[in-house]
Amino acid sequence: MAHLIGQVAFALLLGTAVFFFARRIRTVRRNIQLGRDIDLTDRKSERWATMARVALGQSKMVVRPVAGVMHILIYAGFVLINIEVLEILVDGLFGTHRVFAPFLGGFYNVLIGAFEWLALGVLVACVVFLIRRNVLPIARFRSPEMKGWPKNDANIILIVEVVLMFAFLSMNAADAIAQSRIAQGIWDNTHHYIAAGSFPVSQWLVPLYAGLSDAGIVAVERGAWWFHIVGILAFLIYVPYSKHFHIFLAFPNTWYSNLNPAGQLDNMAAVKKEVDLMMSGDPFAAPAEPAGEAPTEPARFGAKDVQDLTWKQLMEAYSCTECGRCTSVCPANATGKLLSPRKVMMDTRDRVEEVGRAIDAAGGSWGQGDGKALLGDYISEEELWACTSCQACVDACPVNISPMGIILDMRRSLIMEDSKAPEAITSMFNNVENNGAPWAFPATDRGKWTDELAAES
Amino acid sequence: MALTVPTLAEMNARGETPEVLFWVGCAGSFDDRAKRITKAIARILHAAEVPFAVLGSEESCTGDPAKRAGNEFLFQMQAAQNIMVLNGYGVKRIVTGCPHCFNTLKNEYPELGGEYEVLHHTQFIQQLINDGRLRIADGNPFKGRRITFHDPCYLGRGNGEFEAPRAALQALDADLVEMRRCKKNGLCCGAGGAQMFKDAERGNREVNHERTDDVLETGAKVVATGCPFCNTMMTDGVKNAEKEGDIDVKDIAELIAEAADLL
């Protein structure tokens, strides 16, 4: 009977967690789809290869070896220990105990042993990461945008992982004690403990629990088991609200990577249409609209708010885990300017969340909006004008996010929608327009150097 | 004999076709310091007996600074105009001394109807040396000299070209030292993204001063550049550090031209 109650409770918990997770995923998906459409389904084999290399293979993480190697440890631990979670799920639903053991035989012991070592690795790496974030003077963890929730979010994740790993190891330690007491015949096996698993790490925890009664051991083993799985389910719900969502989104985000050279900026199709029209020589010609096709004119040029960005850019905002490698290589940021590429991504995410909530509150419609915008209310012109478009942020991102793309799209809005530019930029535009050069020199002087050269040689 | 550089129109009138079009760029045409780089490139092309021409007054800004400052209309107008000229002459191959022109012509023009083989001058110089068309004098003044190369963003990170400029420096037998931040991690000079044409935003330092620190760390006597804007910024940075007596800022083309005894 007790077993059955456990199973039902487990099924309810699991169902609840999956329900909330799925609901949140639907919201994030809807929010991402608030962005403009863009087709990124070409060059599929390159996309798979990029995802395999960058997300699965963590190729850009190891550029910084200390953080990179420890991150791989946590990542491998997360992925592999989830095989153990699969067993926990089956055990929880069917009231079994270590259900994989009889099928896997000796290999089961190898697996559990390997998980224990990984768990220890994860634990150590998380502690080191906590120290890096909270004690060591690492600049990118101390930027202004990392105060408050972003800092807490990071610490919550790391602490939860430490606690979960400790629970996992405690569970195994208690199980080992139970197994040995049964083997020695000092514990009448009315429980379902079986001789299974090897415990190379949790054996060090055995002295901690060895003094407990049989009932105490069961309490620790079951308690840790429940804590572990409940913790994981809670984490499942938490992750898509957190910067930690990168563990899932890193994969689609790298698949949809920009495959062009980093220096290449997209040519706006709507502008091309107008320029073609002007160049055609007939200023009064009506734009050719293919019959039956809706006009493809965008609502506005460039990006003022999140809906003007592409869905890929919004996906990038949700994929960002705020590591700050972009900001740490940004020349503007390094020289004390307001611009931080990481903040651009965090602002984009905060804003799309705000827009999403407003849409939900209004029963699914955005209507006239909320009078706010990403440009101005979150990201200032001063930040945008500090960018040198050097692409260091793009190169540094371990999951191929482009903060620069958003910055330049917002500059487009400033210029083409609001005609707002620093005076010097306006005069550069005028020079290009009138003289074909960013300076006020006439085109007829372009060849002057050839005369000079002829005279000098 | 005076070194004359024909325009494409002149060459065309003679019924000749150049091997390459030398796209000079605005800085290379108008900025006095950058003009010296332009002339060095012309001397190299001439010495290697490469039939080349320039567009002269028919060349116009590629639109790069306009595009990166957000003015896509102006960029595409410039692109359309340049593409009309280039396609009108049937240009196939372009060499340019400016990484910004290089990136724009190579990556952003094809979609707008301008498809050319575009080379940065360091790439072309590397080819000329490899093909034996350009020879470095044996007693070249840079042999064994400590030189560091400042990667232009739009050549290096932007287009993955890190080796060609370094190959040119190796041809000089120079003592090539790398800065702490180099190649993919190279720090910008501070001029990109239309910053060249405006004052920097509020901050506690100029980017080129920060970059000059990297140069000073290496103890190099020469900073080699591959971009007229980087050249301006590094020259200014070295001056700011009061090291203009110790450190020369020179484009790869100038180093090669000097080493090949062309100046």
Image (cartoon, rainbow, N blue to C red):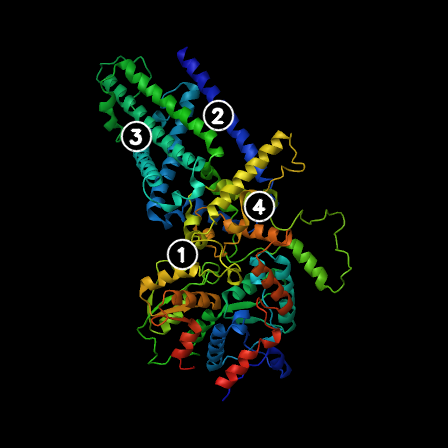
User: Do the residues at discs 3 and 1 belong to one chain?
Assistant: no
Looking at this view, is B90 or A316 the one in front?
Answer: A316
Q: Residue A157: give x, y in percent of width and height.
A: 40, 33
Which SS class for mark 2? helix
Q: Give the residue at mark 3.
A: A109
- The chain carrying label 1 is B
Which SS class for mark 1? helix
**Residue at x 41% of width, y 48% of height:** A325
Question: Would you say the residues marked 1 and 4 are in contact, meaning their CB atoms lie under 8 Å apart?
Answer: no
Number of the front mark, 1 or 2 = 1
| Mark sitting earlier along the chain (4/2) | 2
Number of the front mark, 1 or 4 = 4
Q: Residue A66: give x, y in percent of width and height.
A: 32, 46
Q: CA distance from mark 2 to mark 3?
A: 30 Å
Q: Give the residue at mark 1.
A: B185
Give the amino acid at mark 3. Answer: Asn
Number of the front mark, 2 or 3 = 2
Number of the front mark, 3 or 1 = 1
Q: CA distance from mark 1 to mark 4?
A: 29 Å
What crowding class fits label 1: few (fewer than 14 Cα within 10 Å), some (14-19), or many (20 or more)?
some
Indicate left or right for A57 with A127 as reference.
right
Which SS class for mark 3? helix
User: Do the residues at discs 1 and 2 belong to one chain?
Assistant: no
Question: Would you say the residues marked 1 and 2 are in contact, meaning their CB atoms lie under 8 Å apart?
Answer: no
Image disc number at residue A375:
4
Image disc number at residue A216:
none
What crowding class fits label 2: few (fewer than 14 Cα within 10 Å), some (14-19), or many (20 or more)?
many
What crowding class fits label 3: few (fewer than 14 Cα within 10 Å), some (14-19), or many (20 or more)?
some
**Residue at x 39% of width, y 65% of height:** B240
Image disc number at residue A17:
2
